[in-house]
Image (cartoon, rainbow, N blue to C red):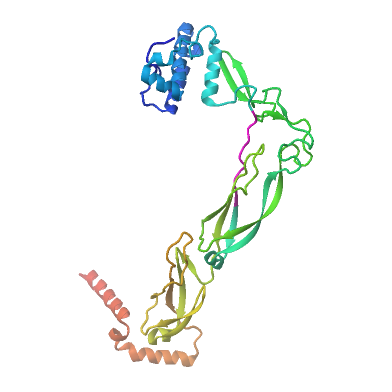
Amino acid sequence: MSKRDYYEILGISRDANEAAIKKAFKRLAMKHHPDRNTDDAEAAEEKFKEGKEAYDILSDAQKRAAYDQYGHAGVDTSAGGGPGYGAGAGNFSDIFGDVFGDIFGGSGGAGGHSRSYRGSDLRYNMELSLEEAVAGTTIKIKIPTLVGCKTCNGSGAKKGSSPTTCTTCGGTGQVRIQQGFFSVQQTCPHCHGQGKTISDPCGDCHGQGRIEERKTLSVKVPPGVDNGDRIRLSGEGEAGENAGPPGDLYVQIHVKSHAIFERDGSNLLCQVPISVATAALGGDLEVPTLNGRVKLKIPGETQTGKLFRLKGKGVKPVRGGMVGDLMCKVVIETPVKLTSKQKDLLREFEKSIHGDNKNHNPQGSNWVNGVKKFFDDMKL
Protein backbone atom coordinates (compact mmCIF):
# COMPACT_ATOMS: atom_id res chain seq x y z
CA MET A 1 0.00 0.00 0.00
CA SER A 2 2.34 2.76 1.21
CA LYS A 3 5.82 3.44 -0.14
CA ARG A 4 6.61 6.11 2.45
CA ASP A 5 9.20 5.34 5.07
CA TYR A 6 7.50 3.54 7.97
CA TYR A 7 9.55 5.40 10.60
CA GLU A 8 8.53 8.70 8.98
CA ILE A 9 4.85 7.68 8.99
CA LEU A 10 4.91 7.05 12.75
CA GLY A 11 7.22 9.98 13.42
CA ILE A 12 9.83 7.95 15.32
CA SER A 13 13.59 7.43 15.10
CA ARG A 14 15.06 4.26 13.61
CA ASP A 15 16.26 3.10 17.05
CA ALA A 16 12.83 3.48 18.74
CA ASN A 17 11.90 0.67 21.11
CA GLU A 18 8.66 -1.31 21.20
CA ALA A 19 6.98 1.00 23.74
CA ALA A 20 7.78 4.07 21.62
CA ILE A 21 6.33 2.39 18.51
CA LYS A 22 3.07 1.56 20.30
CA LYS A 23 2.79 5.05 21.75
CA ALA A 24 3.39 6.66 18.34
CA PHE A 25 0.77 4.50 16.65
CA LYS A 26 -1.79 5.14 19.38
CA ARG A 27 -1.29 8.88 18.86
CA LEU A 28 -1.66 8.52 15.07
CA ALA A 29 -4.78 6.33 15.41
CA MET A 30 -6.53 8.84 17.63
CA LYS A 31 -5.55 11.72 15.35
CA HIS A 32 -7.04 10.12 12.23
CA HIS A 33 -10.21 8.72 13.76
CA PRO A 34 -13.18 9.63 11.48
CA ASP A 35 -15.13 11.18 14.36
CA ARG A 36 -12.39 13.79 14.54
CA ASN A 37 -12.18 14.20 10.77
CA THR A 38 -15.81 14.47 9.65
CA ASP A 39 -14.88 16.80 6.78
CA ASP A 40 -12.74 14.14 5.10
CA ALA A 41 -13.35 10.76 6.77
CA GLU A 42 -12.10 8.86 3.71
CA ALA A 43 -8.68 10.54 3.77
CA ALA A 44 -8.45 9.97 7.55
CA GLU A 45 -9.17 6.28 7.04
CA GLU A 46 -6.37 6.04 4.45
CA LYS A 47 -3.95 7.75 6.86
CA PHE A 48 -4.94 5.31 9.58
CA LYS A 49 -4.43 2.29 7.34
CA GLU A 50 -1.04 3.63 6.33
CA GLY A 51 -0.09 3.94 10.01
CA LYS A 52 -1.39 0.45 10.75
CA GLU A 53 0.77 -0.97 7.98
CA ALA A 54 3.82 0.76 9.45
CA TYR A 55 2.94 -0.43 12.94
CA ASP A 56 2.50 -4.06 11.83
CA ILE A 57 5.95 -4.09 10.26
CA LEU A 58 7.90 -2.22 12.94
CA SER A 59 6.26 -3.97 15.91
CA ASP A 60 7.36 -7.38 14.54
CA ALA A 61 11.07 -7.90 15.22
CA GLN A 62 11.61 -10.19 12.20
CA LYS A 63 9.72 -7.97 9.74
CA ARG A 64 11.42 -4.87 11.12
CA ALA A 65 14.87 -6.38 10.60
CA ALA A 66 13.98 -7.26 6.99
CA TYR A 67 12.62 -3.77 6.40
CA ASP A 68 15.72 -2.12 7.91
CA GLN A 69 17.94 -4.17 5.57
CA TYR A 70 15.96 -4.26 2.32
CA GLY A 71 13.31 -1.57 2.66
CA HIS A 72 9.80 -2.19 1.27
CA ALA A 73 11.12 -5.01 -0.90
CA GLY A 74 12.03 -6.96 2.22
CA VAL A 75 8.48 -7.05 3.53
CA ASP A 76 6.54 -6.93 0.21
CA THR A 77 3.24 -5.77 1.71
CA SER A 78 1.44 -6.23 -1.59
CA ALA A 79 1.92 -10.02 -1.53
CA GLY A 80 -0.70 -12.32 -0.11
CA GLY A 81 -0.57 -12.76 3.64
CA GLY A 82 1.28 -9.47 4.14
CA PRO A 83 -0.01 -6.57 6.21
CA GLY A 84 -1.60 -4.72 3.27
CA TYR A 85 -5.26 -3.74 3.33
CA GLY A 86 -6.81 -4.84 0.11
CA ALA A 87 -10.28 -6.14 -0.50
CA GLY A 88 -10.04 -8.80 2.15
CA ALA A 89 -8.63 -6.61 4.90
CA GLY A 90 -11.96 -5.80 6.53
CA ASN A 91 -13.59 -2.42 7.21
CA PHE A 92 -12.08 0.45 9.17
CA SER A 93 -13.95 -0.23 12.41
CA ASP A 94 -12.67 -3.82 12.48
CA ILE A 95 -9.10 -2.64 11.98
CA PHE A 96 -9.46 0.03 14.66
CA GLY A 97 -10.89 -2.43 17.16
CA ASP A 98 -8.14 -4.98 16.46
CA VAL A 99 -5.46 -2.36 16.91
CA PHE A 100 -6.66 -1.26 20.32
CA GLY A 101 -7.13 -4.88 21.35
CA ASP A 102 -3.48 -5.54 20.45
CA ILE A 103 -2.12 -2.46 22.17
CA PHE A 104 -4.20 -2.43 25.34
CA GLY A 105 -4.58 -6.16 25.92
CA GLY A 106 -7.47 -8.61 25.86
CA SER A 107 -7.76 -12.26 24.86
CA GLY A 108 -8.47 -13.15 21.27
CA GLY A 109 -10.46 -16.00 19.75
CA ALA A 110 -12.52 -18.81 21.14
CA GLY A 111 -9.39 -20.71 21.98
CA GLY A 112 -8.67 -18.38 24.89
CA HIS A 113 -8.66 -19.60 28.47
CA SER A 114 -9.53 -18.19 31.86
CA ARG A 115 -6.82 -16.33 33.69
CA SER A 116 -5.27 -17.46 36.91
CA TYR A 117 -4.14 -14.87 39.42
CA ARG A 118 -1.38 -14.96 42.03
CA GLY A 119 -2.66 -14.86 45.59
CA SER A 120 -2.24 -11.81 47.80
CA ASP A 121 0.77 -11.38 50.08
CA LEU A 122 0.07 -11.35 53.81
CA ARG A 123 1.74 -9.51 56.70
CA TYR A 124 2.10 -10.70 60.27
CA ASN A 125 3.38 -8.44 63.08
CA MET A 126 5.62 -10.39 65.45
CA GLU A 127 6.72 -9.02 68.82
CA LEU A 128 10.01 -10.28 70.25
CA SER A 129 11.91 -9.65 73.44
CA LEU A 130 15.40 -8.20 73.06
CA GLU A 131 16.86 -11.54 74.16
CA GLU A 132 14.91 -13.41 71.44
CA ALA A 133 15.92 -10.91 68.76
CA VAL A 134 19.61 -11.08 69.66
CA ALA A 135 19.88 -14.85 70.14
CA GLY A 136 17.36 -15.96 67.51
CA THR A 137 14.43 -18.28 68.12
CA THR A 138 11.68 -20.33 66.47
CA ILE A 139 8.10 -19.23 67.08
CA LYS A 140 4.84 -20.86 66.01
CA ILE A 141 2.18 -18.49 64.70
CA LYS A 142 -1.43 -18.92 63.59
CA ILE A 143 -2.68 -16.89 60.67
CA PRO A 144 -6.07 -16.64 58.89
CA THR A 145 -5.69 -17.09 55.14
CA LEU A 146 -7.41 -18.26 51.98
CA VAL A 147 -6.28 -21.70 50.83
CA GLY A 148 -7.23 -23.77 47.81
CA CYS A 149 -10.38 -25.83 48.37
CA LYS A 150 -9.39 -29.49 48.63
CA THR A 151 -12.89 -30.74 47.84
CA CYS A 152 -12.91 -29.28 44.32
CA ASN A 153 -9.13 -28.88 43.91
CA GLY A 154 -9.62 -25.15 43.47
CA SER A 155 -11.99 -25.42 40.47
CA GLY A 156 -15.04 -24.13 42.36
CA ALA A 157 -17.24 -26.82 40.78
CA LYS A 158 -18.97 -29.58 42.71
CA LYS A 159 -17.06 -32.86 42.84
CA GLY A 160 -17.79 -34.87 39.71
CA SER A 161 -18.56 -31.77 37.63
CA SER A 162 -16.43 -29.15 35.91
CA PRO A 163 -16.68 -25.48 35.03
CA THR A 164 -18.05 -24.90 31.52
CA THR A 165 -16.85 -22.48 28.89
CA CYS A 166 -18.72 -19.19 29.07
CA THR A 167 -21.17 -18.95 26.17
CA THR A 168 -21.13 -15.15 26.19
CA CYS A 169 -17.40 -14.66 25.56
CA GLY A 170 -16.49 -18.11 24.23
CA GLY A 171 -13.98 -18.64 27.01
CA THR A 172 -11.86 -15.55 26.36
CA GLY A 173 -13.11 -13.58 29.37
CA GLN A 174 -13.56 -10.56 27.05
CA VAL A 175 -16.44 -9.33 24.90
CA ARG A 176 -16.22 -6.86 22.01
CA ILE A 177 -18.71 -4.00 21.92
CA GLN A 178 -19.21 -1.99 18.72
CA GLN A 179 -19.65 1.73 19.33
CA GLY A 180 -19.71 3.56 16.02
CA PHE A 181 -16.27 3.28 14.51
CA PHE A 182 -14.86 1.92 17.78
CA SER A 183 -14.67 -1.74 18.63
CA VAL A 184 -13.90 -1.94 22.34
CA GLN A 185 -13.00 -5.01 24.36
CA GLN A 186 -14.41 -5.26 27.86
CA THR A 187 -14.49 -7.84 30.64
CA CYS A 188 -17.27 -10.33 30.09
CA PRO A 189 -20.20 -9.40 32.39
CA HIS A 190 -21.37 -13.02 32.57
CA CYS A 191 -18.18 -14.77 33.76
CA HIS A 192 -16.43 -11.62 35.06
CA GLY A 193 -13.34 -12.31 32.97
CA GLN A 194 -12.90 -15.92 34.10
CA GLY A 195 -13.84 -17.45 30.75
CA LYS A 196 -15.77 -20.20 32.55
CA THR A 197 -19.02 -20.51 34.47
CA ILE A 198 -20.00 -22.89 37.24
CA SER A 199 -23.54 -24.24 37.11
CA ASP A 200 -23.12 -26.62 40.07
CA PRO A 201 -20.81 -24.93 42.63
CA CYS A 202 -18.81 -26.75 45.29
CA GLY A 203 -20.66 -26.87 48.61
CA ASP A 204 -17.54 -26.11 50.67
CA CYS A 205 -16.18 -23.07 48.85
CA HIS A 206 -19.46 -21.99 47.18
CA GLY A 207 -17.80 -21.77 43.77
CA GLN A 208 -14.88 -19.60 44.88
CA GLY A 209 -12.22 -22.32 44.70
CA ARG A 210 -10.77 -21.05 48.01
CA ILE A 211 -11.80 -21.29 51.64
CA GLU A 212 -10.71 -19.36 54.73
CA GLU A 213 -8.58 -21.32 57.13
CA ARG A 214 -6.26 -20.73 60.09
CA LYS A 215 -2.93 -22.40 59.64
CA THR A 216 -0.01 -22.83 62.01
CA LEU A 217 3.48 -21.99 60.81
CA SER A 218 6.90 -22.24 62.44
CA VAL A 219 8.88 -19.05 61.88
CA LYS A 220 12.64 -19.34 62.31
CA VAL A 221 13.93 -15.97 63.52
CA PRO A 222 17.67 -15.58 62.77
CA PRO A 223 19.97 -14.10 65.46
CA GLY A 224 20.46 -10.34 65.35
CA VAL A 225 17.14 -9.19 63.87
CA ASP A 226 16.03 -5.67 64.73
CA ASN A 227 12.97 -3.44 64.54
CA GLY A 228 11.64 -3.17 60.99
CA ASP A 229 13.30 -6.35 59.69
CA ARG A 230 11.06 -8.66 57.64
CA ILE A 231 11.15 -12.41 57.25
CA ARG A 232 9.67 -13.72 53.98
CA LEU A 233 7.92 -17.07 53.92
CA SER A 234 7.55 -17.95 50.26
CA GLY A 235 4.20 -19.40 49.19
CA GLU A 236 2.57 -18.98 52.61
CA GLY A 237 0.25 -16.14 51.58
CA GLU A 238 -3.24 -16.46 50.15
CA ALA A 239 -3.99 -19.08 47.52
CA GLY A 240 -4.31 -17.76 43.98
CA GLU A 241 -7.55 -17.62 42.00
CA ASN A 242 -8.21 -20.28 39.36
CA ALA A 243 -5.41 -22.44 40.81
CA GLY A 244 -2.93 -19.55 40.51
CA PRO A 245 0.25 -19.55 42.61
CA PRO A 246 -0.02 -18.48 46.26
CA GLY A 247 1.34 -15.21 47.59
CA ASP A 248 4.01 -14.82 50.28
CA LEU A 249 3.84 -14.13 54.00
CA TYR A 250 5.96 -11.31 55.40
CA VAL A 251 6.68 -11.42 59.13
CA GLN A 252 7.35 -7.88 60.41
CA ILE A 253 9.65 -7.75 63.46
CA HIS A 254 8.91 -5.49 66.43
CA VAL A 255 11.35 -5.67 69.38
CA LYS A 256 9.83 -4.77 72.74
CA SER A 257 11.48 -2.23 75.05
CA HIS A 258 13.89 -3.71 77.60
CA ALA A 259 14.07 -2.80 81.29
CA ILE A 260 17.88 -2.46 81.26
CA PHE A 261 19.27 -2.31 77.74
CA GLU A 262 18.68 -0.10 74.74
CA ARG A 263 19.86 -1.22 71.32
CA ASP A 264 21.79 1.01 68.91
CA GLY A 265 22.64 -1.02 65.81
CA SER A 266 25.09 -3.69 66.92
CA ASN A 267 25.76 -1.99 70.27
CA LEU A 268 23.83 -2.18 73.52
CA LEU A 269 23.52 0.76 75.91
CA CYS A 270 22.76 0.74 79.63
CA GLN A 271 22.90 3.15 82.55
CA VAL A 272 24.74 2.08 85.71
CA PRO A 273 23.95 4.07 88.89
CA ILE A 274 26.89 4.45 91.32
CA SER A 275 27.23 6.08 94.73
CA VAL A 276 29.15 9.29 95.41
CA ALA A 277 31.69 7.29 97.42
CA THR A 278 32.28 4.79 94.58
CA ALA A 279 32.63 7.62 92.08
CA ALA A 280 35.19 9.39 94.29
CA LEU A 281 37.15 6.41 95.55
CA GLY A 282 36.63 3.87 92.75
CA GLY A 283 35.58 0.25 93.04
CA ASP A 284 34.34 -2.86 91.26
CA LEU A 285 30.74 -3.25 90.09
CA GLU A 286 28.81 -6.22 88.75
CA VAL A 287 26.94 -5.28 85.58
CA PRO A 288 24.55 -7.44 83.54
CA THR A 289 25.01 -8.51 79.92
CA LEU A 290 22.77 -10.67 77.74
CA ASN A 291 25.19 -13.55 78.39
CA GLY A 292 25.55 -13.18 82.15
CA ARG A 293 27.26 -10.88 84.64
CA VAL A 294 30.66 -9.23 84.28
CA LYS A 295 32.78 -7.01 86.55
CA LEU A 296 33.26 -3.36 85.69
CA LYS A 297 36.18 -1.53 87.29
CA ILE A 298 35.34 2.07 88.23
CA PRO A 299 38.45 4.23 88.67
CA GLY A 300 38.57 6.92 91.39
CA GLU A 301 37.36 10.43 90.56
CA THR A 302 34.89 9.17 87.93
CA GLN A 303 32.43 11.85 86.78
CA THR A 304 28.77 11.26 86.01
CA GLY A 305 28.07 10.43 82.35
CA LYS A 306 31.38 8.60 81.85
CA LEU A 307 31.08 5.79 79.24
CA PHE A 308 32.73 2.40 79.71
CA ARG A 309 32.96 0.02 76.75
CA LEU A 310 32.75 -3.75 77.20
CA LYS A 311 34.04 -5.23 73.94
CA GLY A 312 32.06 -7.99 72.24
CA LYS A 313 29.14 -7.85 74.68
CA GLY A 314 26.69 -6.40 72.16
CA VAL A 315 24.84 -7.89 69.18
CA LYS A 316 26.03 -9.79 66.10
CA PRO A 317 24.14 -8.16 63.16
CA VAL A 318 21.77 -10.41 61.22
CA ARG A 319 23.42 -9.43 57.91
CA GLY A 320 26.90 -10.28 59.17
CA GLY A 321 29.72 -8.25 60.66
CA MET A 322 31.52 -7.89 63.97
CA VAL A 323 29.75 -8.33 67.29
CA GLY A 324 28.99 -4.95 68.85
CA ASP A 325 29.88 -3.68 72.33
CA LEU A 326 28.07 -2.94 75.57
CA MET A 327 28.30 0.75 76.46
CA CYS A 328 27.84 1.39 80.19
CA LYS A 329 27.08 4.98 81.17
CA VAL A 330 27.67 5.66 84.87
CA VAL A 331 25.27 8.02 86.63
CA ILE A 332 26.14 9.27 90.13
CA GLU A 333 23.13 8.87 92.38
CA THR A 334 22.40 11.50 95.00
CA PRO A 335 21.59 9.84 98.36
CA VAL A 336 18.03 10.33 99.63
CA LYS A 337 16.22 10.00 103.01
CA LEU A 338 19.34 10.79 105.03
CA THR A 339 19.36 10.62 108.84
CA SER A 340 20.39 13.65 110.92
CA LYS A 341 23.77 12.05 111.62
CA GLN A 342 24.37 11.41 107.89
CA LYS A 343 23.47 15.01 107.07
CA ASP A 344 25.89 16.29 109.74
CA LEU A 345 28.65 14.13 108.32
CA LEU A 346 28.00 15.51 104.83
CA ARG A 347 28.08 19.11 106.11
CA GLU A 348 31.35 18.41 107.87
CA PHE A 349 32.75 16.86 104.69
CA GLU A 350 31.57 19.88 102.66
CA LYS A 351 33.36 22.27 105.04
CA SER A 352 36.54 20.24 104.84
CA ILE A 353 36.81 20.70 101.08
CA HIS A 354 35.15 24.11 100.74
CA GLY A 355 38.32 26.15 101.04
CA ASP A 356 40.10 24.18 98.31
CA ASN A 357 37.56 24.03 95.50
CA LYS A 358 40.17 24.20 92.77
CA ASN A 359 41.62 20.86 93.83
CA HIS A 360 38.49 19.02 94.89
CA ASN A 361 35.81 20.54 92.60
CA PRO A 362 37.57 21.72 89.42
CA GLN A 363 34.40 21.73 87.30
CA GLY A 364 32.42 23.66 89.92
CA SER A 365 35.29 26.14 90.39
CA ASN A 366 35.58 26.73 86.64
CA TRP A 367 31.83 27.23 86.38
CA VAL A 368 31.81 29.83 89.22
CA ASN A 369 34.68 31.72 87.57
CA GLY A 370 32.84 31.66 84.25
CA VAL A 371 29.67 33.08 85.82
CA LYS A 372 31.67 35.83 87.56
CA LYS A 373 33.36 36.82 84.29
CA PHE A 374 29.99 36.85 82.51
CA PHE A 375 28.52 39.41 84.94
CA ASP A 376 31.72 41.47 84.99
CA ASP A 377 31.59 41.73 81.19
CA MET A 378 27.99 42.94 81.38
CA LYS A 379 29.05 45.92 83.56
CA LEU A 380 31.53 47.16 80.94
How many numbered callouts? 0
From the viewer's perspective, is residue 198 above or below residue 31?
Answer: below
Q: Position of residue 209 (x, y in %)?
A: 71, 39
Give the residue displayed 63% in from the left and 32% down from the top: 115
Considering the image in quadrants, where does the N terminus appear?
top left
Q: Position of residue 32 (x, y in %)?
A: 46, 14
In the image, which residues are magenta? Answer: 113-123
Nearer-the-camera pick, 38 or 233:
233
Q: Position of residue 264 (x, y in %)?
A: 45, 64
Q: Residue furthest left?
A: 380
Residue 144 in the magenta stretch? The answer is no
Does any portion of residue 302 appear in the rendered image?
yes
Looking at the image, residue 185 sits to the left or right of residue 66; the answer is: right
Where on the picture, by quarter, is residue 378? bottom left
Considering the image in quadrants, where does the C terminus appear?
bottom left
Looking at the image, residue 101 sits to the left or right of residue 195; the answer is: left
From the viewer's perspective, is residue 177 above or below residue 358?
Answer: above
Give the residue displayed 67% in from the left and 28% down from the top: 195
Does any portion of residue 27 appear in the rendered image?
no
Looking at the image, residue 358 sits to the left or right of residue 347; the answer is: left
Where on the picture, by quarter, is residue 137? bottom right
Give the residue displayed 37% in from the left and 17% down from the top: 70
Magenta span: predominant SS is loop
